[in-house]
Amino acid sequence: MIRINPATIYLFSVCLLSVATGEEAEIKQVASDGVRLPWHTTDLYWEGASSVPDVKTIGVTFTVDRDVPDSVNLYIAPMGGQYLNKIMFYGGIQSNVNGWPSPTERRRVHPGPGAIFSRWGGAPVSIDAAKPVAGGLCESAGYEGEFVSVRKPIRWKSGTYTWELRREDTVRLKGQPYTWFACFLKDHKRDREHRVGALRFEGDVFSFNGRSTSFVEIYATSRIPRSGVPKVKVTFQPSSVNGKASTPDSVSVYHPRKGDRGSPSPIIGRAQVTNGGVEVELHNEVLQGDAAPPSRYRLELASESN
């Protein structure tokens, strides 16, 4: 059993910098076996952390061990489906972001790698709930439920990053409070921080129930409808809320397969506990025999106070 000391989470993130090789991931086409994109190769459900009644900041630190070219569609989501109050949000980095150049210029562009922050659910949302940065992208649509999103082109490479939301201004619309949360991507290896954009949430106080999700996905775009698969490792650490690392006791791993719920994938993902969190291996060929993990399994984590 690997023990995770919350007091040393940041130290782990710095140490993980050495894991990033700077090499480019090997790309191969993987037979789909009739499974349509997107492929959720690995879903991680972090369980057992304490709830937080008033969220000011929330984020996750993660490491990508090698460069991923923009000739593939890879989505690394350190926060892949969790709630502020009853509003779900997700985000991370993609090897190919796409979206509208502005709220009024609604044509799809594909500028390359970048970061993304999206929300859905709650009250009906519109593009008015998005504030993209200069040179950023946005989108609002109903193809994933009512959702709104901001994206920023960033040519990310191998290294350690922190994807984080920070609470900003609260405003009143028709007598009701609404609050802006801004998304930032911190590049630890290059000591740079990027503002990705901001989204508006209904309310003025936001709780987090302690449960979060991370995932690694291969997706489709009109630019690359049939993506190859990069061989890459991604290490996710537990979420941090208001500057304090959470202490989940386990991670439930799900590799949805053909006929399963969710977004099925060929057997190309695998997860294991490692120093500072959970490592997801993405393979560029179908795993077979003893190398193929079960569809569902649990990874036990342990924390200690000293």
Image (cartoon, helix red, strand yellow):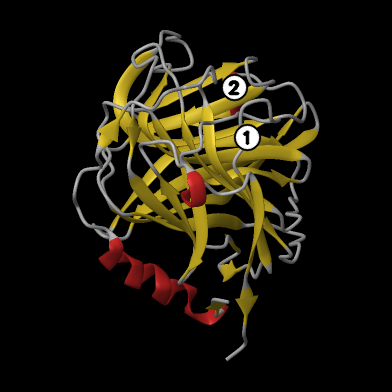
Q: Vertical placement of 185 versus 135: above or below?
A: below
Residue type, mark 2 in image? Asp
Residue type, mark 1 in image? Arg
Instruction: Say which mark, if any, is on residue 11.
Output: none
Q: Which residue is mark 1?
A: 200
Front-most of residues 225 and 51: 225
User: Helix, strand, or loop for circle 2?
Assistant: helix
Q: Quadrant of residue 172?
A: top right
Q: Is residue 238 left or right of residue 174?
A: left
Q: Quadrant of residue 42?
A: top right
Tell me the quarter of the image containing the N terminus.
Answer: bottom right
User: Which residue corresponds to the image point at 62% horizontal and 57% vertical from the top-left?
Assistant: 56
Instruction: Say which mark, if any, is on residue 128.
Output: 2
Q: Vertical placement of 300 versus 257: above or below?
A: below
Q: Vertical placement of 80 versus 6: above or below?
A: above
Separation of residues labelled 1 and 2 (CA atoms): 8 Å
Contact, mark 1 vs mark 2 (Cβ under 8 Å): yes
Q: Vertical placement of 140 versus 90: above or below?
A: above
Tell me the quarter of the image containing the C terminus.
Answer: bottom right
User: Which residue corresponds to the image point at 74% horizontal and 64% vertical from the top-left?
Assistant: 48
User: Which residue corresponds to the image point at 54% horizontal and 21% vertical from the top-left?
Assistant: 35
Q: Earlier in the sequence, mark 1 or mark 2?
A: 2
